[in-house]
Image (tube, rainbow, N blue to C red):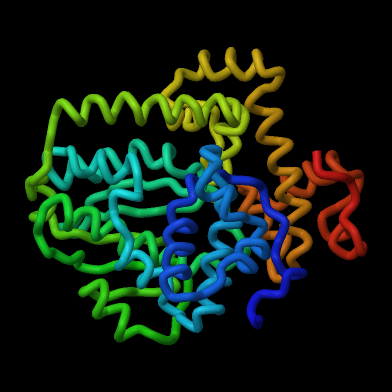
Amino acid sequence: MSGIPQSEIPQIPFLWTHGVAARETLHYLDRNGIDGEPLLSRAELSRGRLFEDPGGVSFAAQSLFLEFAAIEANDTLLGLHVAAEMDLRDAGILFYLAASSATVKDALDYLVRYAGAASEAIRLDISRQNGETVLTARPVLAFDEPHRQFSEFIALAVLRVLQRATNRDFAPRRVTFAHARDSGLREIHRILRCPAEFAQTSDSWGFPESVMDLPIVSGDSRLLEILQAHAEDLLSERRTAVGLRGLVENQLLSMLPRGKVQTAAVARQLGMSVRSLTRHLAQEGTSFGEILDRLRHRLALRYLEDRRISVQQIAWLLGYSEIGAFNHAFKRWTGTSPRRARNLSVAPGSTP
């Protein structure tokens, strides 16, 4: 089987996902007579883990499995084709929240609020600009592994959920993808029924404002209350599973390149006061400053291994406004400078 060499699969931190895309892709392969077992094994997944283990799977492993499946099926648009055939109810709590909302606007608000119940690897946010509402999906960490199929799967799955919930065959004004693509563009346009732009800053859906007020035909306020309570429980379980330290790290991963690493900003994202965040971190035996410092150290060592990224760019990715501050911190961590560490066969120091 041709494709991504195992030696080129990067070692990345575990970020949890419920595994919907992987399960739907395995169903798709089964229906088309394609043996998915070797692909699962290569992505360090298993059928039992996907269907029997409620603990979820690695987001990175899921993305790799979709890429392997696309290669094996000789289908460069596999993610879209899987999303087009899936039973939307299999998307779980997020589908039912959307289907029980009052309007599309409410449905999107719930998707954003409870996305963490399905995956801790992707964050959704909503903005309004130029007469449209934009739903944006951002990874908490910029992974090196391919994720084209997953991004395209999600693009169509979200659109189908909203169409199903409203019983209206509307289309976005545009869809953007962070990944590049130079083939299959006409088919993508046919499936999504709107312009698709690639190699953009993020994955997003741009909807006309008129769509926001469309009613959800299956809206049910009582059921929505029950689902919200369940979703809150799921989020609480994830917080317990990864600990508050892990949640802080995930927030910092998305904030570092923007230089927004203040305690107050992270506390606000987690729905906590600064005082409460500080107290709970102390109960876990750590502090905001320690988490930030150790995360920067760990990321710096990883980024230095990629010679395509300049030292100045690494400083920016780590949230430093000046390269001098990064150099000082790196010397404190390792006893040497970033440039010298890069010139060594193995960066000094070990992951903290």
At 46% from the left edge and 49% from the top edge, which residue is drawn?
A: 122
Towards the viewer: 331 or 121: 121
State the image coordinates of residue 198 (x, y, percent, origin top left). 40, 74
- Count of numbered circles in the view: 0
Q: State the quadrant of the C terminus.
A: top right
State the image coordinates of residue 230 (x, y, percent, origin top left). 34, 27
Q: Is residue 251 visible?
A: no
Is 231 rendered above or below residue 98?
Answer: above
Q: Is residue 10 visible?
A: yes
Q: State the quadrant of the N terminus.
A: bottom right
At 24% from the left edge and 54% from the top edge, which residue is drawn?
A: 161
Towards the viewer: 265 or 72: 72
Towards the viewer: 97 or 1: 1
Residue 308, image quadrant:
bottom right
Residue 144, image quadrant:
bottom right
Q: Is residue 344 left or right of residue 250?
A: right
Is 242 rendered above or below residue 34?
Answer: above
At 16% from the left edge and 50% from the top edge, which residue is drawn?
A: 165
Q: Is residue 334 left or right of residue 89?
A: right
State the image coordinates of residue 137 (x, y, percent, origin top left). 39, 53
State the image coordinates of residue 11 (x, y, percent, origin top left). 72, 56
